[in-house]
Image (tube, rainbow, N blue to C red):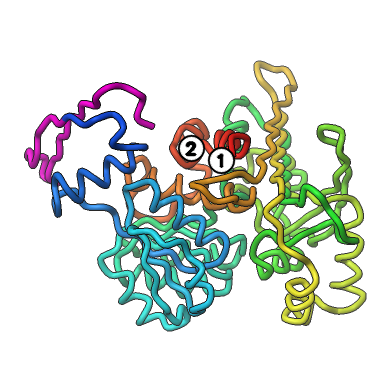
Amino acid sequence: MVRSCRSLSVIVILLKPTGKLLIFGRYFFHSNAFASTSNLTKYLAEVIFPGRIQLKEIVIIGAGKIGSTMARLLAHSGDYKVTIADRSADQLSSIEKHAAISITTTDISDSSALAGLLVGKFAVLSAAPYHLTTTIAQAAAAAGTHYLDLTEDVESTRQVKKIAQDATTAFIPQCGLAPGFISIVANDLARRFDTLDSVRMRVGALPQYPSNALNYNLTWSTDGVINEYIEPCEAIVEGQLIEVPALEEREEFSLDGVLYEAFNTSGGLGTLCESLKGKVRTLNYRTIRYPGHAAIMKALLNDLGLRHRREVLKDIFENSLPSTTQDVVIIFVTVSGRKEGRLVQETYANKVYSAVVNGQMTSAIQITTASSICAVLDMLAQGDLPSRGFIQQEQIGLNAFLSSRFGHYYEQKAYAEKIAS
């Protein structure tokens, strides 16, 4: 934010990619002229140097709750022009009207049309269902565009890794909360130890005020929730990388006086199993819910056979479970190992609540997921991440992430807006 003062002095230095001087100048503005640095950037780009300061062009695939939040964060930053693509005109019609946001109705399954949309863009960010991941990644490779996604699907990420081998741009999958931020935290804790014993990761997006038997509200992709409840889960047990069944190995724990359960779900580890294989005895990921949720889900999926009828289960969820913006994201990572010969444990525990972001009430899962992928995009744009090949979340430093303009939402600075509103 621009601090209150009588005038604002801005020195502008722009260089060509070759390093030659393009613009140099000092400009003075009244302090009340700009409410934020993003507004100042926009003014410089459109008025002082029209056509000289170029905003990075981004395509977001998927106009749902997460995709729309990503667009809002990037547009209000003042550094990006965003095109949102979706096959649903109804979804697109609800997108915030902003000068830096445009919309287009696109059949995402049409790889050639999608590649044409991506040509000349800096990056594509996928907030689409996991089964479209490979199609979007292939289109990004064909267009020579950087690729980031939010998928939790293990097989899709394996396909992205293969595509990245011959690509000329960066491919960064699993940039959300879990997988995503959770891997950044776990790796940051793990690197502080001389030798590792266990890494236990727990994440949950829960309603603040549960009101049904499942103690759950829809807060993100229904397809994603169902997929993580069904697909096998990677884990390291006694030093061996294995697969364990979803919804099993249930445990209970208390945090801030509230009782929770946690159980195996697929995809939350990202590529951390691969990175820590041979270095840790125990590594696992479990989803946090209120007690009783797992038992009902096992009855639906196993006893009623809905694991084989995903579309039926999706229809039931979307017509029976209300959505809510009054949610809380719980992040709980515990790492144990040896430091200087002593067995030591370190824990990261955090709760992120829904809050007002850029003038709109935004759920905690929207905040954490969208801000995470936007933070990674920013680091890529600023040259803090490799510009080519497959990039794992654990290659990202936690301090660099949290100090970024989007990563700071994990420290709940946005909560002050909610209190003030």
The three-letter amino acid code for the residue at tag 1 is: Ile
35 horizontally vs 62: left or right: left
Q: Is residue 25 depicted above or below 203 in this figure?
A: above
Identify the residue at image location x=41%, y=51%.
74
Name the residue tied to disc 2. Answer: 401
The three-letter amino acid code for the residue at tag 2 is: Phe
* Callout 1: SS: helix
Neighbours of disc 2 within 10 Å: few (<14), some (14-19), many (20+): many
Position in image of residue 305 (x %, y %): 86, 79
For the N terminus, the image quarter is top left
Name the residue tied to disc 1. Answer: 184
66 horizontally vs 348: left or right: left
Residue 79 visible in this rendered orientation of the protein? yes
Of mark 2 and mark 1, the one earlier in the sequence is 1
Whether residue 154 is in magenta: the answer is no
Along the viewing direction, whichever of 347 and 204 lies nearer the viewer: 204
Position in image of residue 40 (x %, y %): 27, 40
Identify the residue at image location x=66%, y=65%.
224
Observer-side mark, 2 or 1, equals 2
For the C terminus, the image quarter is top right
Whether residue 14 is in magenta: the answer is yes
Discs 2, 1 touching: Cβ within 8 Å: yes
The image quadrant of residue 230 is bottom right
* Callout 2: SS: helix
Segment colored magenta: 1-27
The image quadrant of residue 412 is top right
Along the viewing direction, whichever of 291 and 317 lies nearer the viewer: 317
For the residues labelled 2 and 1, the Cα–Cα distance comes to 9 Å
Identify the residue at image location x=27%, y=22%.
6
164 horizontally vs 365: left or right: left
Position in image of residue 139 (x %, y %): 38, 73
Neighbours of disc 1 within 10 Å: few (<14), some (14-19), many (20+): many
